[in-house]
Amino acid sequence: MIFLDSGFRAWGYALGRVIGVAALGLVVGWAIGHPWWGLTGALALAALLQWHHLHRLEDWLRNRNRKTPPDAGGLWGEVISQVARLHRRKQFHKQRMLALFRELRRSSATMPDGVVVLNVAHEILWFNRKAGELLGLRRKTDFGIPLASLLRLPEFARYLARGEFSSALRLQPRIGEAFWLEFQGMPYGEGQLVLLVRDVTRQAQLETMRKDFVANASHELRSPLTVIAGYLETLSGEPDLPADLRPPVLEMRRQSERMTAIITDLLELSRLEASDEQVAGAEIDVTALLALLARDLKTRDGKRHEVEVRVESGDRLRGDEGLLHSAFWNLVDNASKYTPAGGRITLRWWVDEDGGHLSVADTGPGIPAEHLPRLTERFYRVDAGRARDAGGSGLGLAIVRHVLQRHGGELSIRSEEGQGSVFTCHLPASRLVRQAVALPGESGYAPTDRA
């Protein structure tokens, strides 16, 4: 209201001055006998004064960072005052933004990780000092250039093009050097991207050492354990074995078999981790594979569980049959171990627009929600005592995860306590080998089969 009142006063003052000048011009003109000439001259002088104020305002606006605002009264003074106030406010916010930006640059320069900001076209908008060191970027000259064209790494280009940044990308930027970088994208704004870059050479070396140690140790333990298991098997079958020694010998034999299973799983896991390359493989008849898994489970467990096979598509898979059989059998074996007698195990295969899906569902006790994210970790068990009694190695789901990764797929787990569990292998559509739809009874398998 104060600004509004002052504006009205300024306009009233300006109008009063115009009327006063016009009246003075008329009086002077009347005195000399030409009133209209006097009025015209007075109005011309008033216009010249306004032009002078306008010129001073334009000159100050052009050089406002070096000059002070001109001193004027009336309406021009009000306009200059408003413009000066807006200019001071703009300068304040500009200085504040510059201070924040300098603080951001100083703080980012101390970060141990590289930070690169990319626009929608994945062109470089900004990067900190660490990113320049890790990626060999140069300030100013590399701004506005697509990052993928500077790095020239096909895997990194696919990572940006795919737009899926839930997981990090680890790769070697220079072939032949033991130098590893990890990229993690974080989208923000309208398609922009913050890319974190970390030097993970040390972690990669430690991971390689760990894998080599596990593989070598497992390989070295396999031979002596085979000898021990052989002697224990011979002793357990010896008719002259004293009765008080038979239970310990049988228990040692059971534990040696469990250790053999653990070593076998470790060797298989080490072999899977040795390479991240996608397998090509050949066509796999999923229907026959599920029938084989159900038959093997029935042979081993007898009538302890009801086994149901549901095949909803005749499409086949392209992959490594040995690896996929191992992965699927681990899921079936887990369901058998944790499903009580009389429960049901369901093997299902179906296809949709996302690809092929194979699930193993059971009616076991279920898994608490807090354990689900860690189930595929090595040796992770929800109930260690129960898993040990069941003879599990704690490596089965880790093997499943690696097998699916080698086929471009992933594992999802859905479970509730008291409601059973469903483990689903999702495989991409590129792995499917489409088959013509057959009428029931013509395809050689039943859509639903119970064992």
Image: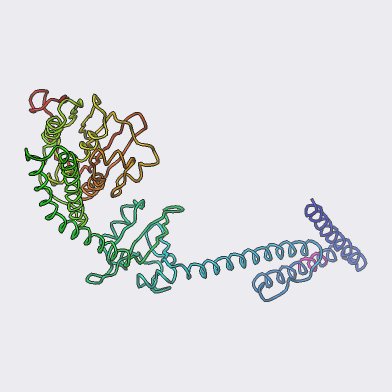
Query: Seen in the image, is 240 located left or right of residue 345?
Result: left
Q: What segment carries the magenta color?
A: 42-47
Residue sitting at x 33%, y 36% = 414
Vertically, is 360 above or below 125? Answer: above
State which quarter of the image contains the C terminus: top left
Tell which of 437 and 254 is nearer to you.
Answer: 254
Q: Quadrant of residue 392?
A: top left
Name the spot of residue 2 as percent of width and height, x first: 80, 53
Where residue 178 sits, quadrant-wise, is bottom left
Q: Please give the count of numbered marks on the rendered protein.
A: 0
Prevalent SS, magenta region: helix
Q: Residue drawn 32% across and 67% down? A: 202
Query: Quick one: 155 or 27, which is closer to the camera?
Result: 155
Residue 338's spot in the image, x, y percent? Answer: 27, 34
Scheme by which the image is coloured: rainbow
Q: Is residue 46 magenta?
A: yes
x, y percentage for residue 310?
A: 19, 28
Q: Image quadrant of residue 37?
A: bottom right
Residue 296: x and y in percent read 12, 34
365 versus 177 height, above or below: above
Residue drawn at x 29%, y 60% is 157
Q: Is residue 180 left or right of 33 when viewed as pictured?
A: left
Magenta residue check for 324: no
In this orientation, which residue lies closer to the viewer: 134 or 146? Answer: 134
The outermost residue toward the right is 31
